[in-house]
Each structure stands twice: as structure tokens, then as C-alpha cells.
Image (cartoon, grey):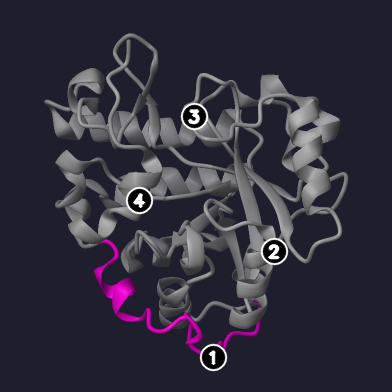
Amino acid sequence: MEKKGPSRRKILAGAAAAGAYSALSKTLGAEERPAAPAPAPDFPLVDYHAHLDNLGLERALEISQRRGVKFGIVEHAGTKENQYPIVLSNDDELKRYIAMLDGKPVFKGVQTEWVDWASCFSKDVVAQLDYVLTDAMTYPGKDGRRVKLWERDAPERVDMADRQAFMDRYVDWYVDIMGKQPIDIMANASWLPAPLANDWDTFWTPARVKKVIDAALKFGVAIEISSSLRLPKLSFLQLVKEAGVKFSFGSNLRGERIGTLDYCLEMAKELGLRREHIFAPAPAGRKPIQIRNV
């Protein structure tokens, strides 16, 4: 039996204690204060990593309108083995979710879990979504079973004793996900588990970054700039832009903070991003689930 630990949601939401939210939190004032500065870029602002937890759709729409940020709503999708309050696991559940969002001024997405999520759904139903988002934070353990890298026992279960060797396997995992899954966005990009997190610049070498970016370019996957994690760092993002890989923005925040894109806008300004650099959902007939042989 897997040992239970804090959820990925709690890890991400609790990143303030580790410093991930420290700069972000300084920008959050009274509820009526816009969370992001007036946008200078020539592209519409979209938070493609918005969850409805503890909020509800109508309140989310109010926040979206007030902040001038369109939301891409995502719900977890995959087998019921994935432990979340809601996990969409079959066509009927996915259809109900899509129907809830139909006609609303949002993009419809899912955050997929593990490697077997696509087997839960028919391609035609997945194609009704605007996009599919995933991350590399659930990782195969020594026994082949899924390991949540943010949990306390993860270093032992995936063998991080040799951290450089683990990092090479972790980068290969990124490539494997993008190569074998029909996804649009790689979220939480460049996040590292706790034993490695303080040495981000050491572990994310140019060669490793290039390997991830080459896969993103080959398979048409956008790299998320995470406003909650304040990742990837500028050095990583510069290589993403140089390669011609698209960017998406994501808050991955809950409640009243959704749509807070301060770090995304900060990086967009540093990089000189324009409309052509920014992810947009593929049109009908051109979605990854429809055109990729995976």
C-alpha cells in the first residue's frame, strides 16, 4: 500500500513556505485589486491551468471578468486509482463535465493523470475538449507503480540516492510523456522534488533543458509558465523561445487567486513574447488526440 502524504495540490498551494509563492504573495492585496498589471502584450491573457476547487464556476467567471483573464478550466482525468476529490474516468463523466462548461466564456480542458488516462475515454469525446494538460510529477517507482514525487517517501521509492542519475531518468520521463501521450501542454515544467529543488540551476543543465525542449518541439507540446511555482526560470524559457516552442500561462492556484499571472507576465516582458509565441487550442480535426498515432 502506498504511504499517504500531502497531495500535489497541497504541495503547490504550500509552496509559499518553501519560497515559491513569496514574490507572488506580495502582489496580492484586497479582493478588488487586479492580480496582474495592465497587460502590454498583443495577445489575450488566458490562464490554462485554472481549477474550480472551493470556488464554483459562476464565481470563477466573475473573477475572470474582473481580472481580464480568460480561464481554461481543468479537471483531473484518468483512472480512479488517482486520488483526487474528482477524477473523470469514463466518457459519461467527461461528457457531463464538458456540458457544464458548454456556452461559458472559458476553454475546456483536463489535467490528465499517469500514462493510462487515454484508455478511459473515446477519442471523439476527448476531441470535444479544447486542450489536454499534464505534468511529470507522478513518476514510475522502482516497482513500476506510480509515485507522487511531492510525497515524503518519494526519494526512497524512486531511488534519488544518485541525484544526477535520477535527474537523467526524470528528463527521459518528460520526453516519454510527450512522445506517447496526445497532450497539448506540459504543466509545472521544470519543477523538482524536494531533495533537488534548492539546486535547480545545477540539475537543469542546458543539455537536459534542450532534451525536453526538443521533445516539445517535435510533438507540438506547449511549455507552461507557472505563476504559482514561478517556474521555469528565465534561462530555461529563453531556450524555449529560441527553439520556437509555444508558451502557455497557468496559475494553478485555487479559490480567489485563480487567474493570477504575475510571473507569467513578468517573463513575457523579459522574453519579448508576442501573439505568435503563445499557445492557442488546436481547431477541430487538428487536436493531438485526432492526429497523433499514440
Mark number for residue 58?
Answer: 2
Name the residue: 51% across, 19% down: 81
| Residue 90 placement, left or right of 270 | right
Tally of numbered tags: 4
Mark earlier in primary sequence (2, 4): 4
Look at discs 4 and 1 and give the one toward the viewer: 4
Specify whether residue 22 is painted magenta: yes
Mark earlier in primary sequence (2, 3): 2
Kind of element beneath mark 1: loop
Mark earlier in primary sequence (1, 2): 1
* Percent x, y of residue 4: 30, 24
Residue at mark 1: 38
Q: CA distance from mark 2 to mark 4?
A: 24 Å
Look at discs 2 and 4 and give the one toward the viewer: 2
C-beta proximity under 8 Å, tags 4 and 1: no
Question: Residues in magenta?
Answer: 20-44
Residue at mark 4: 12
Q: Residues within 10 Å of mark 1 (few under 14, many from 20)?
A: few
Up the image or down, 131 lies above or below 76; here it is below
Mark earlier in primary sequence (4, 1): 4
Kind of element beneath mark 4: helix
Specify whether residue 36 is painted magenta: yes
Mark earlier in primary sequence (3, 1): 1
Q: Residues within 10 Å of mark 4 (few under 14, many from 20)?
A: some
Place residue 115 in its image quadrant.
top right
Q: CA distance from mark 4 to mark 3?
A: 24 Å
Residue at mark 3: 176
Q: Residues within 10 Å of mark 3 (few under 14, many from 20)?
A: some
